């Protein structure tokens, strides 16, 4: 959702970032190859939402993880240890790094 970042930091924040800085940020973040929000991702998210009773926004995060083969979702927002159809929630504040990676 780099477009949301760009709009927010250039037009909604006071003071906002200069356009050149915001564009540089988007270019840098694009190197992470973010998942595109498209119809297949939305369909996956709806399935996650229905199966696990998550908010649509949380379901989109899980769906994006699934699409990229993510086995662990690092977040303090969802229930630690919850298995969301093959993607397991890990609260990074409750575990040592070596526990998360094993």
Image (cartoon, rainbow, N blue to C red):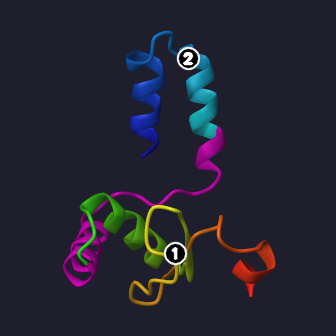
Q: Residue furthest front?
A: 94
Residue 25 coordinates in the image, percent (x, y): 62, 33
What residue is shown with label 1?
Answer: 68
What residue is shown with label 2?
Answer: 17
Please name which of the two marks, 1 or 2, marks the residue nearer to the observer: 2
Return the residue nearer the eye: 93 or 89.
93
Residue 55 coordinates in the image, percent (x, y): 26, 63
User: How many other residues sit within 10 Å of disc 2, few (<14), some (14-19) or many (≥20)?
Assistant: some
Is-magenta flag for residue 77? no
Residue at point 55%, 17% (across, down): 17
Is-magenta flag for residue 44? yes
Residue at point 23%, 73% (across, down): 43
Q: Quadrant of residue 95?
A: bottom right
Residue at point 45%, 78% (across, down): 66
Q: Is residue 23 above or below residue 80?
A: above
Residue at mark 1 to residue at mark 2: CA–CA distance: 31 Å
Q: Is residue 11 above or below residue 99?
A: above
Q: Residue furthest top?
A: 15
Q: Which labelled disc corresponds to residue 35?
A: none
| Relative side of 35 to 55, left or right | right
Residue 29 coordinates in the image, percent (x, y): 61, 45
Q: Main secondary structure of the magenta part?
A: helix
Of callouts 1 and 2, the N-terminal one: 2
Q: Quadrant of residue 99?
A: bottom right
**Magenta segment boundaries in residue numbering:** 28-52
User: How many other residues sit within 10 Å of disc 1, few (<14), some (14-19) or many (≥20)?
Assistant: few
- SS under mark 1: loop
- SS under mark 2: loop
Q: Residue furthest right?
A: 98
């Amino acid at each position: 959702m780099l477009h949301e970042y760009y709009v927010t930091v250039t037009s909604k924040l006071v003071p906002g970032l200069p356009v050149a800085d915001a564009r540089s940020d988007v270019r840098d973040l694009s190197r992470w190859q973010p998942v595109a929000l498209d119809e297949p991702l939305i369909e996956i998210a709806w399935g996650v939402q229905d199966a696990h009773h998550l908010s649509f926004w949380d379901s989109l995060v899980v769906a994006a993880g699934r699409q990229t083969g993510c086995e662990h979702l690092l977040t303090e927002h969802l229930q630690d240890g919850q298995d969301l159809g093959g993607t397991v929630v890990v609260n990074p504040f409750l575990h040592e790094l070596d526990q998360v990676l094993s």
